[in-house]
Amino acid sequence: MELPQYRVEAATREQALLILNQLLVQRLDKVEVIPMEIKLPQTEQSRKPWMKFAGVFKDDPDFDIVQQYIQEYRQELDATEYGADIWYAQGSKLSLWILDTDCVSVFQRGNLEIARRLNIIDANEVAITIVTVEEQLRGRFQVYSTSAS
């Protein structure tokens, strides 16, 4: 808080603070505090941060091959000892929408139905897992490494 109109000099710090306190109390006695709510403008983008990714790969020539690599990697994982295990949370309430790799990929390709559904869900209730991030990166890197060789 800046109050440049108040300048206090005293022999000690404590005395200066006491005088400053008295000046502020006198000033605040004359002030009326009116609470009010100020709504900051929010753009649609800030309320739905994922919407900027809708259709991001719509015209990407490598998109289909990335999806193929993702599928192949999943099949490799499923073939391992623990890859196909499924864990269920018995009796838990759904409190978060988790988008799997397929949903994210189709959304990035520009699927309007997924975009429409995501647009009506609160941004705090939507997430992706690290598995989706890893699968997408792995698929993309596979395309890059194949084209580089």
Image (spheres, helix red, strand yellow):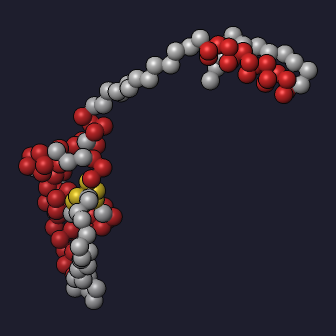
Q: Residue at x 26, y 59 (%)?
A: 95
Would you say 70 lies left or right of 33 here?
left
- Quadrant containing the N terminus is top right
Front residue of this view, candidates 146 and 35: 35
Above or below: residue 76 compared with residue 34? below
> At which x and y percent is residue 16?
82, 21
> At which x and y percent is residue 23?
72, 15
Q: Residue furthest front?
A: 29
Front residue of this view, candidates 64 and 42: 42
The answer to whether any part of residue 140 appears in the image is no
> At which x and y percent is residue 53?
23, 46
Q: Residue furthest bottom?
A: 81
> At which x and y percent is residue 145?
30, 64
Above or below: residue 66 compared with residue 60? below
- Quadrant containing the C terminus is bottom left
Front residue of this view, candidates 144 and 105: 105
